[in-house]
Image (cartoon, rainbow, N blue to C red):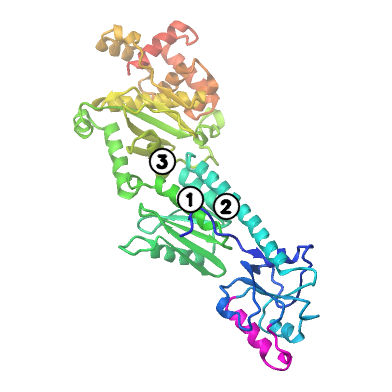
Amino acid sequence: MPDPAVPPTPPVPLAALLAREDLALRQIAGPSDPSLVVHWAHTSEMADPYPYLLGGELLLTAGVHIPDAAGSGTYFDDYVSRIVAAGGAALGFGVAPVHDTVPRALVAACDTYDLPLIEVPPGTTFSAVARAVWQLMAQARLAELRRVTEAQQSLAAAAARPDPVPSVLRQLAQRVGGWTALYGPEGAEIASAGREPEAPVRGSLAELTEVVRPSGPGTPTSATHATAGIHLAAYTLSTGFVLGVATPAREPGDHTIASVATVLLTLLTGEQHSGSGASRNAALVRLLLGGTAEEVAPLLGAGDTWFVVHACTNDQRDRPNPSGARGTARPATNHPHPPDLLTATALGASLGSALIDPVGDIVQLLVPADRQPAPQPGWTLGVSAPVPAHQLPAAAAQATRALARARATRTPLVRHNTRPALGDLIPADEAHAHARALLGPLAEHPALVDTLRTWLSLHGSWDRTAVALAVHRNTVRQRIARCAALLGAELDDPDVRMELWFALRQE
């Protein structure tokens, strides 16, 4: 069996062979189609070469087999029709030493049966023609191997992006020059990329994917078809997903490239990422981050500790700030789409956790404390302190603040500060009472509290606070001024800032 990682040797365009000036070949009959190709060269002086042809050959002959009276009968028609029936790609006729010219009856027969007829001049040997074919094939094979290698590298890079599944599909569509689609275990199209084909072609591809969808022993892992001049291919993933590819042409290396994409998509759509399993994980995370200690502890184990991680893609982090009249917020437009479930689960796999929940433009994750979260390419992360199960809701607030600071400072990962603090020296009930009294004027204005907290955490930076809160910088100025008025405090005073920060930390 051939190595599936190596594409088959590409055929040689007949036009490329005719373009070789050193051979001086000339087509004198048959169709002049630029798409005509030859797979190899073969020399034969048999009157009936049919049993010895595999198809796709440039058959070379000097006409030794031609009888003297061949021109007056059906000899040439029979000879050419047998070559065509065997799948021969073209016929090369050598002039001299047997024949001074190509027989006219042979030219007529090739025109009749649409077989390209090539005149090989006296100075060109059949060995030279065969060598030229193999040289062109070697060049084409090298180019195809280079194309496959570059495609493998680009697909691997796409799989490492924050949106790996759409990126792999886009890269595959670009590399094969067509359209790609990923179908879920239930048969629904869940993602696609490339130039979308007509509806009938899409329907045919969807039908082809059902052929390879696992249904028991003997189910094929891949299938091909052609419709309306479009080549279709379907590849099954072991996770129940199916990859569909539609291209206007089918190059030798396309199957290898698609196979690489299939492996990557299989890894990205593992069983823990599919359908109901991912939905259960998302529901569990929501319960854990919002539930009571009594609800949470039995689910994760009282002795386990966890990080809460909040993450957003760098595209989401860097999206334009909304702005509007008089400092009010206006929804941003034309910013990237938030991460989908497949993208979120790929991040979870990188961090070593299947407990993920994409909410809006944020992905929430629970990561076991023995797996220290590390920066991830293309992502911005906020990480809580490691906490037992009953403290997860508080850890979620820590992760939210850490992510806000990471977005504002454009830092790949920010961790919640766990060093001993001033609050550790004061009884908790007294600290909470002091915080409630100090921040009481802001109690009915949660937006002001969030703005004050973020502004203080970013050392009074208007621009960074605007980025963290996704509002205009003038909105930040107005809110801070309102805080100062309600609190009756001078917020430029470092002592005031320290006391307010202490109080905010006690909430």
- The answer to whether residue 126 is left or right of residue 501 is right
Location of mark 3 (residue): 346
Viewer-proximal residue among 210 and 471:
210
Percent coordinates x, y for residue 289 in the rendering: 30, 32
Precedes in sequence: disc 1 or disc 3: 1
Location of mark 1 (residue): 260
In the picture shown, does residue 420 fall above or below 210? above
Badge 3: residue crowd in 10 Å (few <14, some 14–19, many ≥20): many
Question: Regarding mark 2 in the picture, which secondary structure is present there?
Answer: helix
- The answer to whether residue 305 is left or right of residue 416 is left
- Residue at the location (38% across, 17% down)? 417
Of the 4 image quadrants, the one containing the C terminus is top left
Precedes in sequence: disc 2 or disc 1: 2
Q: Measure the alpha-carbon separation of dots 2 and 1.
A: 12 Å
Residue type for callout 1: Val
Q: Nearer the viewer, mark 1 or mark 3?
A: 1
Q: Nearer the viewer, mark 2 or mark 1?
A: 1
Magenta stretch holds residue 86: yes
Badge 1: residue crowd in 10 Å (few <14, some 14–19, many ≥20): many
Percent coordinates x, y for residue 201 in the rendering: 51, 66
Badge 2: residue crowd in 10 Å (few <14, some 14–19, many ≥20): some
Numbered tag placed on residue 175 in the rendering: 2
Percent coordinates x, y for residue 52 in the rendering: 57, 76
Magenta stretch holds residue 79: yes
Magenta stretch in the rendered image: 65-87
